[in-house]
Every structure is written in C-alpha cells, then in structure tokens.
Amino acid sequence: MQLGLGSEPLHWIDLLTYLPSHRFVFRENRVPYYQRLFQQHDGKRQWWKTERSGYLMWPYLISVYGMGIATTYAMGRMVFGHKTWFGKA
C-alpha cells in the first residue's frame, strides 16, 4: 500500500492516523459541561435541555399527536359506519 510520501510503504499502525474513526481520542471532555447542563434546576424537562432537542422532539411530537388524532378520527368514522377516511363508503 503506497499512501506515504516517497516509495516506502506504510505500516498498518501508520494507517490508523488516516482513519477518521480514531479522531474521538483527541476530543475535549464534554462530560462536565453536560453534567452542569442537566443538573440545572431551570424547570425544563430533560429531553428539552440541549439546543438540539427540537430537531428530535418536534418530529416525534408531531408524529405521535398526529397519529393519535388520525386514529381517533378513523375510529369516529367507524362508529358511524364509514370504513374509509373520506366519503360515504
């Protein structure tokens, strides 16, 4: 394998520097930051604490409440004898 400079081949241990999966070793420790964040008594629920929570929570809430409303609507139509979403069939 010729990834190095020049004509000498690289050793397999040298290849670890090229792999992006080993970059987590040199990251800063985020544990104290998240401990302070989640142990604050600010009245927020745990799943709304971070600034990225909305990206996960809003699609989840829309799908949960949307499916609840849709099934309740369909159940109401079934009670009145309609077996389709719209129309009289």
Image (cartoon, rainbow, N blue to C red):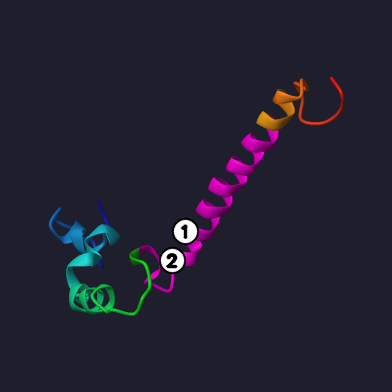
Relative to 51, residue 17 above or below: above
Q: How dense is the environment of label 2, judged by Cα within 10 Å: few (below 14), some, or many (20 and up)?
A: few
Q: Quadrant of the C terminus?
A: top right
Q: Position of residue 55 (x, y in %)?
A: 50, 63
Q: Which residue is mark 2?
A: 53
In this view, the residue in front, 29 or 35, is 35
- Residue 71 colored in magenta in the image: yes
Q: Is residue 60 left or right of residue 40?
A: right
Residue at the spot x=26%, y=67% of the render?
5
Q: Quadrant of residue 30?
A: bottom left
Q: Quadrant of residue 87?
A: top right
Q: Is residue 53 left or right of residue 14?
A: right
Type of residue at label 1?
Leu
Indicate the secondary structure of the residue bearing disc 2: helix
Residue at the spot x=58%, y=42% of the render?
68
Type of residue at label 2?
Ser
State whether the magenta stretch is mostly helix, strand or loop. Answer: helix
Residue at the spot x=53%, y=54% of the render?
61
Indicate the secondary structure of the residue bearing disc 1: helix
- Residue 76 colored in magenta in the image: no
In this view, the residue in front, 65 or 77, is 77
Q: Position of residue 33 (x, y in %)?
A: 24, 79
Q: Position of residue 28 (x, y in %)?
A: 21, 77
Q: Which residue is mark 1?
A: 56
Q: CA distance from mark 1 to mark 2?
A: 6 Å
What range is drawn magenta here?
A: 47-74
In this view, the residue in front, 85 or 28, is 85
Check if mark 1's residue and mark 2's residue have beta carbons within 8 Å: yes
